[in-house]
Image: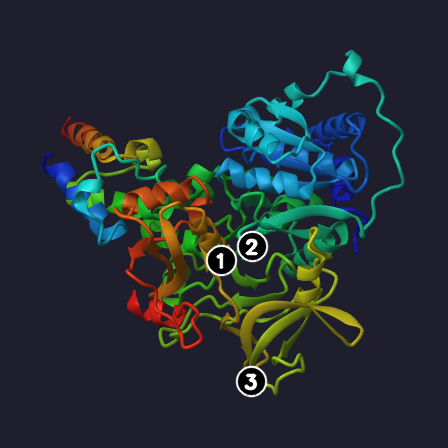
């Protein structure tokens, strides 16, 4: 796993799955549809992504689909970063 | 009362201001009063041709839209009670509600049909279906109904006697401690008495623009829908995605010039924290109401600083009574105030008393259970006569609903909320019976014993499931959360799942819930 995914994974484990065996949270584990984070948690997650990776989320353009797995979050952060550079 | 039925509000407003906008969706569709009245008439006729009669129930699983609002009025006009389902809840839970309510017809949006209908059939219920293509602007509902010239549009059977205040208007299902949701039955008179009180207190006018933020299965939606229609105002439904998105919600409130807002405190707290409210112009916002849970004072103070303009109120009332007490929030919250605002004084349509375990009034200023009587109080729980009987206290020739909320009357007469006498908790304004979560856990094949406790963390409720697994390996927290998500509405899913080799016991052998709370 790369840095972004690893950082987000640590955050999700710490905030929403305390005490969980880390290996159960994979890149494709559904976070929202799988009941791990709810809509208010999703806001906290976005705020974390903004401060951690220096991106700005305009709306839920984050859209929940973009936050449902660690892999999707990684793609989302990459898209935001490249948009920020142009 | 200012009307004989809730739908009379629509008929009258459509007569007064047929061209005024009744519903304006965020996507731009608008429905005038004349259009809303006509569309609801068409549904009413269709339902009556389907055999729906006065006193029947009609369930609806539709996204919050002009179509859903028209559906509510069409069902009421047909003399039936509407039973709103939660499109976001697991289909099996919604199916239980369809079955329990004995709904004769189920209006379902096509997006939910494939998941919901088989679950409904599996319960043995067989309501007629009315499948609504994508709801929006009333077009979905209109397309689902027969056109006037077709064979299916034969004249409906002659109308029966008119619906009156004692007729059932809606059944709202709330969490049940036995694992099955229970239906709170409310009459037209219950709804009208609440709406009339809102009119007296908040004085809305026809140019008012109401948000519709709560979902339709949540009792808070009643004031938005019926108060707005009564006054010929405009309802702006807030879709669930926008509704929980603090990054856009403030902009929507400002740009749509919303003047009347009601929601749970957790949404407002999120807006104050992340909504960049200082960027927008909220000069149209006149009245801001919140209800459903305690608003932590630091978060409320922050919101008040950002929104000093509107009149602000804390409303209180379980689904069973409608709103029954209220407290106005001052323009400026003094920095020394460290506790939440009280739930306030009884509304004009409600009477309150504070009782001890024997049912007698406690001394002024002592703790006791809040009991409520008046025209807003429900008839009872649907099909649960024993549970209904237990919920009421008979005194002074009146039925007093026992709220289960422990309160104290302050010297100035305002009631302060102190806690619960049972195991119900509130999260994001939703009622959660911890027993319903335990009942779901009881179905898990690997869990031999479990208990659910709620703890409070800086004003935020945290729900913790504590389990003993009968077999190894224990399910992971990820697996448990996915399992909960398939059975419980999202707001009921425990925050944490813990496994113990044995659950602590009291001296009488019961699970020691107090000890569990201390452990986590």
Left or right of residue B519, residue B441 in this image = right
Element under disc 2: loop
The residue wearing badge 3 is B366
Name the residue at the left extreme.
A2
Q: Verify CB contact (< 8 Å) between mark 1 and mark 2.
A: yes
- Relative to the observer, which residue lies in front, B457 or B235? B457
The answer to which quarter of the image holds residue B466 is bottom left
Query: Of circles 1 and 3, which is in front?
Result: 1
Q: In this view, does A14 lie above or below B503?
A: above
Q: Which of marks 2 and 3 is in front?
A: 2
In x, y percent, where is residue B190?
Answer: 72, 55
Mark closest to the chain's N terminus, 1 or 3: 3
Same subunit, labels 2 and 3: the answer reads yes
Q: In which quarter of the image is residue B162?
A: top right
- Specify whether A67 is left or right of B116: left
Assess disc 2: are there few (<14), some (14-19) or many (≥20) residues with their C-alpha within 10 Å of its C-alpha. Answer: some
* Dot placed on the residue nearer the N-terminal end, 1 or 2: 2
On screen, residue B71 versus residue B438, left or right, reads right
Q: What element carries label 1?
A: helix
| Label 1: how many Cα within 10 Å (few below 14, some 14–19, many 20+) | many
Please give the chain letter of the residue carrying mark 1: B
Q: How far apart are marks 1 and 3 (CA)?
A: 29 Å
Which residue is label 1 attached to?
Answer: B435
Mark identifier at residue B176: 2
Q: Which chain is mark 2 on?
A: B
Callouts 1 and 2 in the same chain: yes
Colouring chosen for the image of the structure: rainbow
Task: Verify CB contact (< 8 Å) between mark 2 and mark 3.
Answer: no
Q: How far apart are marks 2 and 3 (CA)?
A: 29 Å
Going 17% across and 41% down the picture, which residue do you hit?
Answer: A23
Q: Which chain carries label 3?
A: B
């Amino acid at each position: 796993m790369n840095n972004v995914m690893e950082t987000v994974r640590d955050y999700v484990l710490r905030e929403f799955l305390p005490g969980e065996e880390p290996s159960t949270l994979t890149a494709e584990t559904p976070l929202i549809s799988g009941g791990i984070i709810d809509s208010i948690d999703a806001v906290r997650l976005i705020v974390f992504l903004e401060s951690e990776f220096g991106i700005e989320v305009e709306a839920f353009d984050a859209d929940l689909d973009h936050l449902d797995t660690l892999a999707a979050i990684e793609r989302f952060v990459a898209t935001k970063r490249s948009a920020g550079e142009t | 009362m200012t009307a004989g039925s809730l739908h009379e509000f629509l008929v009258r407003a459509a007569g007064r201001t047929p061209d005024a906008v009744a519903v304006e969706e965020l996507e731009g569709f608008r429905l005038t009063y004349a259009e809303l009245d006509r569309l609801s008439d068409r549904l009413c006729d269709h339902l009556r041709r389907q055999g729906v009669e006065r006193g029947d129930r009609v369930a609806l699983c539709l996204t919050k839209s002009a179509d859903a609002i028209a559906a509510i009025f069409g069902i009421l006009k047909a003399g039936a009670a509407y039973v709103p389902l939660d499109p976001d809840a697991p289909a099996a839970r919604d199916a239980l509600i369809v079955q329990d309510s004995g709904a004769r017809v189920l209006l379902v949006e096509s997006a939910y049909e494939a998941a919901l209908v088989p679950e409904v059939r599996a319960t043995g219920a067989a309501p007629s279906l009315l499948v609504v293509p994508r709801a929006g602007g009333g077009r979905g509902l209109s397309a689902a109904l027969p056109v006037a010239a077709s064979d299916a549009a034969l004249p409906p059977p002659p109308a029966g006697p008119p619906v009156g205040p004692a007729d059932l208007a809606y059944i709202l299902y709330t969490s049940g401690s036995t694992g099955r949701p229970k239906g709170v039955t409310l009459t037209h008179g219950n709804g009208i008495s609440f709406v009339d009180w809102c009119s007296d207190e908040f004085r809305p006018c026809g140019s008012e623009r109401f948000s519709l933020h709560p979902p339709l299965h949540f009792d808070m939606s009643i004031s938005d829908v019926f108060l707005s229609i009564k006054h010929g105002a405009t309802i702006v439904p807030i879709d669930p995605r926008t509704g929980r998105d603090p990054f856009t919600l403030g902009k929507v409130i400002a740009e749509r010039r919303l003047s009347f807002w009601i929601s749970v405190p957790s949404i407002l707290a999120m807006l104050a924290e992340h909504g960049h409210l200082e960027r927008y112009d909220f000069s149209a916002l006149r009245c801001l109401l919140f209800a459903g849970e305690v608003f932590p004072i630091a978060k409320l103070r922050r919101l008040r600083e950002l929104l000093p303009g509107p009149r602000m109120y804390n409303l209180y009332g379980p689904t069973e009574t409608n709103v029954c007490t209220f407290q106005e929030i001052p323009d400026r919250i003094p920095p020394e105030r460290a506790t939440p605002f009280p739930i306030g004084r009884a509304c004009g349509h409600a009477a309150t008393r504070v009782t001890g375990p024997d049912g007698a009034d406690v001394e002024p200023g002592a703790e006791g259970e809040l009991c409520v009587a008046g025209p807003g109080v429900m008839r009872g729980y649907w099909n649960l006569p024993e549970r209904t009987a237990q919920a009421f206290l008979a005194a002074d020739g009146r039925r007093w609903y026992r709220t289960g909320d422990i309160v104290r009357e302050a010297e100035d007469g305002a009631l302060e909320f102190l806690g619960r006498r049972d195991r119900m908790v509130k999260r994001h304004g939703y009622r959660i019976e911890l027993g319903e979560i335990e009942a779901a856990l009881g179905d898990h094949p690997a869990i031999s014993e479990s208990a659910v406790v709620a703890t409070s963390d800086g004003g935020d409720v945290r729900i913790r499931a504590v389990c003993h697994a009968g077999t190894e390996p224990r399910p992971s927290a990820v697996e448990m959360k996915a399992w909960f998500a398939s059975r419980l509405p999202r707001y009921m899913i425990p925050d944490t799942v813990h496994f113990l080799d044995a659950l602590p016991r009291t001296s009488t052998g019961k699970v020691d819930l107090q000890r569990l709370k201390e452990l986590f």
